[in-house]
Amino acid sequence: MSIDSDFSYTPIPIPTTLGETLRGLFSHASTVILASLAVGLIVTRIIMGNWTSADLIGPLLILCFWPFQEWLIHVHLLHYKPRKIFGKVRDFPLANKHRQHHKTPNDLSDITIKWQVYPIVVPVLFALNFLIYPSPELAVGALATFFTLAFNYEWSHYLAHVNWQPPLEYYRRRQRQHRLHHFRHEQMWWGVSMGLADTVLGTSPEPHEVQRSPTINNVHGLFS
C-alpha cells in the first residue's frame, strides 16, 4: 500500500529509499533527542559497569509493558473525543494534533513527538527512575531501555508513512498494520512499534474481516 496513492496532499516529498527515510526521520528534533538520549544512556551504563542479574529486571518490565502503554495512550489520549464538561467543550491539543494526522497521514512535516515535551518529561522520568531503583546503575539501565524503545516508536511510526519498505519482516508488519489503522479502520490496530497489545486485546483482526471506516480520515466526525 503506497502512502501517496490515497492522498494528494503532499507538503514534502515522501521518502522512497532508505537514505531519504533516514534524512527525513532525523530532520525532526524529537528523533535526534531520543537517539541522543538512548545512545548516551547505553554508553553511560556500559562505562558504569557493576553488572548483576538485577540489571535485567527494569528493562524486562519496561519491554513487557511498552506495547500496552502504546495501546492505552493511542486509544485514550490520542483518540480522545472532545466532550462537554461543566458546560464547556474539553479537548487536548495532542488529540487535536492526532486528528489532523489522520486527516492528512502523508504530511511528514509534523509527524513526530513535539520537542517541547522533552524539557518537562525527561527530568520527570530521570527523577522517577532514580527514586524507584536502588542503585544508579539500575536506574540508568532502565532509562536506556525506555528511550531506546521510544526511539524505536518514532522509527516505526515514520516507516509506516513512507514508501520505502524495510527489509526486516518485523518492521514490514508494523508498517502494514499501522497503515490499516489509517486506511482501513481507525479503531483497530492501535500498536505502532509493537503489536502484542492488539493481539491480546483483540484489536488486530484479519483485514478482510473489517470494512473501511467512513471516518477513517475524520476521527469522531469532527471535521466539517
Image (spheres, helix red, strand yellow):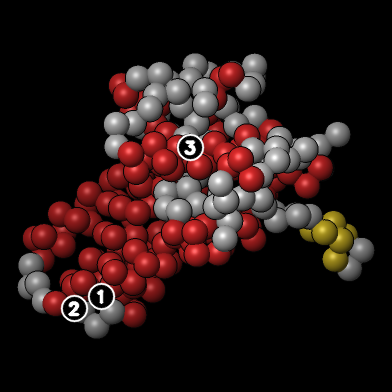
From what the image shows, is residue 202 above or below residue 169? below
Quadrant of the rendered image containing residue 31: top left
Q: Which residue is mark 3?
A: 176
Q: Is any part of residue 22 visible from this angle?
A: yes
Number of numbered markers? 3
3D distance between C-alphas at marks 2 and 1: 5 Å
Point out the image quarter for the C terminus: top right
Q: Which residue is mark 1?
A: 57
Q: Nearer the viewer, mark 3 or mark 1?
A: 3
Asked whether 75 or 151 is in front, the reply is 75
Report the disc number at residue 54.
2
Asked whether 205 or 193 is in front, the reply is 205
Q: Could you classify mark 3 by the number of other residues whose Cα lies within 10 Å: few (under 14), some (14-19), or many (20 or more)? A: some
Q: Position of residue 3 (x, y in %)?
A: 54, 25
Q: Find numbered disc 1 in the image and state the secondary structure of the residue it sits on.
A: helix
Q: Position of residue 63 (x, y in %)?
A: 34, 64
Does the residue at mark 2 contact the one at mark 1 (Cβ under 8 Å)? yes
Report the disc number at residue 131.
none
